[in-house]
Amino acid sequence: MSLATLLILPLLSIHQLLLPTLAYLHPTLRSPFQDLAVYGLCPKTTFHSSPHTPPTPNIVRWNDAACSSGSILASFNGPSVPHPGPSIFTASGELVWHSNEYGVAMNLRLQTYNNGPVLTFWAGEKAATSGKGSYYILNERYELVRKVDVVGGELFGDLHEFITTPEDTAILTVYNTTIADLSGMGLARGKESWVTDSLFQEIDLESGELLFQWSALDDFDPKETYMGQPLSGFAEDSGFDSFHINSVDKHPGSGDYLVSSRHTHTLSLISGEDGEVLWVLGGAGNDFEDLSLEAEGGSAIEFRWQHDARFVDAALLPIKLREYGDEEEGVYYVSLFDNQKAGPLHRDAEQSRGLILRLDTRDEASMTAEVVQSFTSTYGTLAGSQGSVQILPPSPSL
Ligand SMILES: *[C@@H]1O[C@H](CO)[C@@H](O)[C@H](O)[C@H]1NC(C)=O
């Protein structure tokens, strides 16, 4: 027996035998031990009655009175997940439903279509930072009622966004590699370089007709990007992803679109009438004065690599924030997930944060942005990719 084996064997038996036994006797140890990979890198739950093997959730902290008892929608994928697909769990982590009929899925959501509740998700081929696939709408019996595709022969449905609207239209994102001017962006990039454009479409779900389309390259110069991509721009299969659209929301009143761009650090409002950029929050072309720069919640405009920007109905703000709840035209409440990190190359803070902002655009000459609330996770997570913020209805017992 080699010296290395002699050293590893006792450690392995502690990790694989002693710790699981301790957790069996003291169930409160399960959660920290799961983080120490005592149960493997991606612990799975198995069933006698079903072939599904969903990842075992690790509940880090729980409060019966304050935590929402609603279901959790998730779509796992990656090398440790043998059966990727949309999944639903109870709040305590038991599997309610999972499908492996659609392959790799993302962005499972509960939405409304034809006046009824539906499940929606994207499924298809996942590329490094986007995807090529279609969108699926399932009814309450988990039956497929509609498969939605992007309009335009050469285009593919991207995984980042798929929302339905009260008018039974859908908004989705598209990544399209094309030629654009990257001269001055270093590494001998020229006037004709490969750029991955960010688009979104609004489609009528009944007829499939394209109602609206916007392209980031029309309004945002690739030079406004913060993303370093030393190997991109030179070949068609590795376009320079200067904008990286990752969410679109439609304002219920004005019909304008809120677009989040991870790589320019901007939220922008796009006119639903003519596609014009009405304002830009954050990034190189920021239009707002920051009222929170020195405040406790941190800056309202210095979010970085953010995801999931949504209009928030002021009436649904938590009670202690109601003082803010003015619903005048031109005042917006917006939630977003402020990553502050992107991949291994960019790290701008110690933790990611959830943010609720108040944007006052009533006076075009002096628009202001303010942090209404900011929150970080129990674990101080710094997420280099993805993330979301949802405001849940208040717990009935509070
Ligand atoms: C997508 O890119 C191609 C070039 O590769 C271009 O011809 C086409 O117009 C683009 N489509 C849209 C909708 O921008």
Image (cartoon, grey):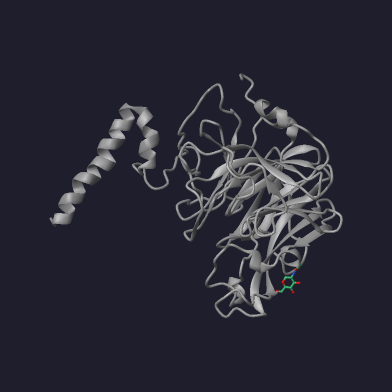
Q: Looking at the image, how many numbered discs can be counted on the residues?
A: 0
Picture quarter containing residue 251?
top right
Ligand 1 in which quarter:
bottom right
Is 180 or 359 nearer to us in this picture?
Answer: 359
Expressed as whole percent of the image width and height from the top left, the position of residue 99 reads 59, 46
Q: Residue at x 66, y 42 (%)?
A: 291
| Direction right: furthest residue | 273
Is 27 or 48 nearer to us in this picture?
Answer: 27
Q: Residue at x 57, y 75 (%)?
A: 186
Residue 112 seen in the current view: no
Expressed as whole percent of the image width and height from the top left, the position of residue 339 reads 55, 49
Residue 203 seen in the current view: yes
Q: Is residue 139 above or below residue 131?
A: above
Is 379 or 122 nearer to us in this picture?
Answer: 379
Picture quarter containing residue 316?
top right
Q: Quadrant of the N terminus?
A: bottom left
Expressed as whole percent of the image width and height from the top left, the position of residue 228 reads 54, 66
Q: Is residue 356 above or below residue 101?
A: above
Q: Residue at x 68, y 57 (%)?
A: 134
Expressed as whole percent of the image width and height from the top left, the position of residue 398 reads 61, 20
Picture quarter containing residue 311?
top right
User: In this rendering, would 55 be left or right of 1?
Assistant: right
